[in-house]
Image (cartoon, rainbow, N blue to C red):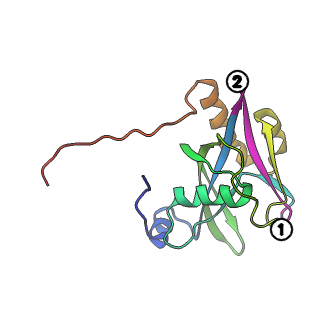
Amino acid sequence: MSPSPVSNAGESAHLHADVLAAGCVPWRDRAGELEVLLVHRPRYRDWSWPKGKVDKGETLPEAAVREVLEETGYTVTLGLPLPSARYTVGKNLRKHVSYWAAEVTEKPTGAVQNPKEIDEVRWVTAERAKAMLTRFADREQLDKVVHAHSTGTLRAWPFIIVRHGKA
């Protein structure tokens, strides 16, 4: 079930941001060991999580799933919400990036859409990711994923409550 569309302008105002973006920490379990997927951006020469700007009429979760597919070729299932990132870009524009843990259970279904934007995608252990992530603040999302994995609470499943009521 898809979330209902929201106005990007309204959502940006609610989050106190000039630029609204969404992304994921893609993860998989390999024989009990947590691995996460990092992307390399040649423009910034950094390792980061797949993320990008929200398109007009798109919700934050929709943008997160789309960005992972475009930047890595993987289709993901969103799970736990993770800490957001807030920082300044360009000429004092406030950027807000909402993140989710996102389980990858299949082989890539697509290819990286823009090799000039993302030139490498790499599965690594959580320990290796901590060393590779360029922005120190990106470790906040990783720490939450590692903790959830260690407590057995990382995997998510749909849960719908239906309430009978008068209109």
> If you read the primary sequence from the N terminus, does the residue marked by circle 2 or circle 1 appear first?
2
Q: Is residue 62 above or below residue 123?
A: below
Residue 13: horizontal and vertical position, in percent?
A: 48, 68
Q: Quadrant of residue 81?
A: top right
Q: Is residue 87 above or below residue 10?
A: above
Q: Is residue 140 above or below residue 43?
A: above
Answer yes or no: is residue 97 visible.
no
Q: Quadrant of residue 128?
A: top right
119 horizontally vs 158: left or right: right
Q: Residue at x 80, y 38 (%)?
A: 124
The residue stretch that appears in magenta:
29-44
Residue 118: horizontal and vertical position, in percent?
A: 80, 61
SS of the residue at dot 2? loop
SS of the residue at dot 1? loop
Label 1, on which residue?
Answer: 116
Residue 9: horizontal and vertical position, in percent?
A: 48, 73
Q: Amino acid at mark 1?
A: Lys
Residue at mark 2 to residue at mark 1: CA–CA distance: 34 Å
Q: Amino acid at mark 2?
A: Gly
* Label 1 crowd bin: few (<14), some (14–19), many (20+), radius 10 Å: few
* Label 2 crowd bin: few (<14), some (14–19), many (20+), radius 10 Å: few
Q: Residue at x 74, y 65 (%)?
A: 113
Q: Does the stretch in magenta take in 5?
A: no
Residue 111: horizontal and vertical position, in percent?
A: 75, 59
85 or 23, which is in the foreground? 23
16 horizontally vs 44: left or right: left
Label 2, on which residue?
Answer: 32
55 horizontally vs 130: left or right: left
